[in-house]
Image (spheres, rainbow, N blue to C red):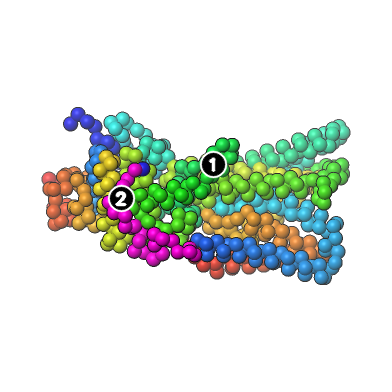
Amino acid sequence: MADAPLYEAVGISKSYGHVTALFDVNFSVNPGEIVGLVGDNGAGKSTLIKILSGVHPPDRGKIRLDGVERTWKSPHDAIEAGIETLYQDSGLAPDLTIGSNVFLGREKLKPGILGRLGFLDQKAMERQAAEELKRVGIAVSGSRRTVSDLSGGQRQAVAIGRAIAWARKVIMLDEPTNHLGARQSIEVLSVMRSAKEQGLGVIFISHTLPHVLEVTDRVVVLRLGRVVRDAATSEFDAESLLGTITGLIEAS
Amino acid sequence: MTMTPASTEGQGRAAPAADPNPPATEPRDWARSILGNQQFLLLVALGALILYFYSKRSVFLSSGEMANILDDFCSLILLAVGETFVIVSGGIDLSVGSTASFAGVIGAFSMRGMVSHNDSEALVLVVGTIVCAAVGAGVGLVNAALINWLRLVPFVATLATLGAGAGMAIVLSHGIPIGDDTRAIIFSQAKVGPFSWPVFIVIGILVISWLYLHLSRYGRYTFALGSNEFAARAAGINVRRHLVSVYVLSGLLSGLGGMFLYLRLGSGAPTSGAGDELRAIAAVVIGGASLLGGSGRLSGTILGGLILTTVTSGLIISNVNPNWDQVAVAVLIALAAALQALRPGRRRA
Ligand SMILES: Nc1ncnc2c1ncn2[C@@H]1O[C@H](COP(=O)(O)OP(=O)(O)OP(=O)(O)O)[C@@H](O)[C@H]1O
Ligand SMILES: [Mg+2]
């Protein structure tokens, strides 16, 4: 146990007004590990993700990356540190093209003086975005289409592709199979597996328990803002996982 | 960045139109042709208006009247350009007209002393321009502060500065125009080719604004902010800083608009920009920008501004009661908004 986890949240609490969304939550992910984060609606899963991605500051608790304590002032800091997030609520700008969305926040500028004046190398971005999406197994044709022209599933695919393409250390996917058909959902699972093979830490939120049992190495169960179980996936079956989530099976 | 897919099957594949081999006509092209069409429609409308007024009164196409329309256009379009950035970013700036008046009055105070000292006209105008721009940027900063730190919605924040700016312009000037700078009027009417030289300054500002709105990272962030603020923030964009810059830009351009009004009148009149916020917003909306943010073209705003100034001049020349002008502007806004609602394909994510 000498090695610190790749990414770790210790004693995190967070309230919205007088709703306690998280209370004293400990959570971690190791390199090359897929951790499932499950819990009923409103259990606090998305809140934890938003704290880990720098969208919200925690009220209490610490965040450590590679054993070093970090404070995210904004999502920008977390992105810089190699942490990518797929948000449950759309993280895409619908009026921008697919390519512009893939490069949002890290635009390529033209070489030379034009670049220094802030002008975009749109062609290079569109081309590279198309390649990048293809590489992670996402073929939405035409990176110059605006996202508002895409179906829900296609948008989801673009958002996943963007996160996978940029992640260097940790990737957090908040209900990535939302809007996706059965076959596309299986695709997402394999995308997560290959991220794991690359040595990334993967955090997977889902209500589809068979997926969670199939792909994860470890499962963390949240109930009403508290961690009620953190155990190897092999210790669960479909019934016991559901029971732990709903509270029918009390935590040991 | 070096992920290899477990399979080359696309996730978007089963959904319609996600074929790996893109069909020849993509929805994007189709959408663009609609947008292109809208600009084309505006151009047709502008041409029709000009022909109509020309057929009624042939003086409409006289060089004197054209110069009038252009002058009118110049002071309006500066406000409308700033308004375009603000509206694309998902906000609204109601203060542009009163900022122009207020900046014009302050600028006129600063220039009055120099005029009476008989300083060189160019120097006077440079100083006046700087003062007007600075005052305008200051008002923009106040707007940004009210929105960013007091968390007021842009409508309320800029309504407050509209009132404050208009009021202060009247209080400071005691309601009368400041300065009597006939030299400035004459100086600013010096022609370079067919147009007076300030027209070229406005053209320069339009070109730079177009480049920055549509081809630069600054413009990209402006669209992203208006399209989905959460997405912009989650992508690591400093949305607060960007929002501040957009309102400061709008204020600065409004201040310059105030300077243009000074050049036309030879004075800083406290009500010179009154009502121009409506015209500026109208130009942007007629130009096809959505008040929801995230879409718009500067070329549309320019055409919208030309249409508005043409209608105004046309009505004046046709000896119509000038108060009809406001009604005409209102009708144009309503028409443009109705057209926008009919435009297909815009879904919010
Ligand atoms: N921005 C917010 N403002 C106020 N309350 C919030 C906000 N976001 C979340 N909450 C509350 O915090 C609690 C946890 O919400 P959260 O979104 O983290 O749940 P979740 O586990 O992701 O649920 P779901 O499975 O439905 O996505 C809920 O009670 C929710 O109402
Ligand atoms: Mg959630």
Q: Is residue B5 magenta?
A: yes
Q: Is residue B323 magenta?
A: no
**Residue at 19% of width from left, 53% of height from top?**
A214
Q: Are marks 2 and 1 on the same chain?
A: no
Q: Is residue B5 left or right of residue A221?
A: right
Magenta stretch? B2-26
Within-10-Å neighbours for mark 2: few <14, some 14–19, many 20+: many
Query: Quarter holding the N terminus of chain B?
Result: top left
Query: Quarter holding the C terminus of chain B?
Result: bottom left
Chain under numbered label 1: A
User: B100 or A179: which is nearer to us?
Assistant: A179
Within-10-Å neighbours for mark 1: few <14, some 14–19, many 20+: some
> Residue B192, how many percent across, how many down?
82, 46
- Using the numbered discs, state the Cα–Cα distance from disc 2 to disc 1 in whole angstroms: 30 Å
> Residue A62, how many percent across, how many down?
30, 35
Mark 1 lies on a secondary structure that is: loop
> Residue B82, how many percent across, how many down?
63, 49
- Inspect the image, locate mark 1, and give the three-letter code of the amino acid beneath it: Lys
- Please tell me how many numbered marks the rendered image carries: 2
Decide: is B22 above or below B197. Answer: below
**Residue at 14% of width from left, 51% of height from top?**
A236
- Inspect the image, locate mark 2, and give the three-letter code of the amino acid beneath it: Pro
- Residue named by callout 2: B5
User: A92 or A229: which is nearer to us?
Assistant: A92
User: B307 or B101: which is nearer to us?
Assistant: B307
Q: Is residue B339 left or right of residue B78?
A: left
Does residue B38 appear in this view?
yes
Q: Main secondary structure of the magenta part?
A: loop
Mark 2 lies on a secondary structure that is: loop
> Residue B99, how many percent across, how many down?
68, 46
- Residue named by callout 1: A110
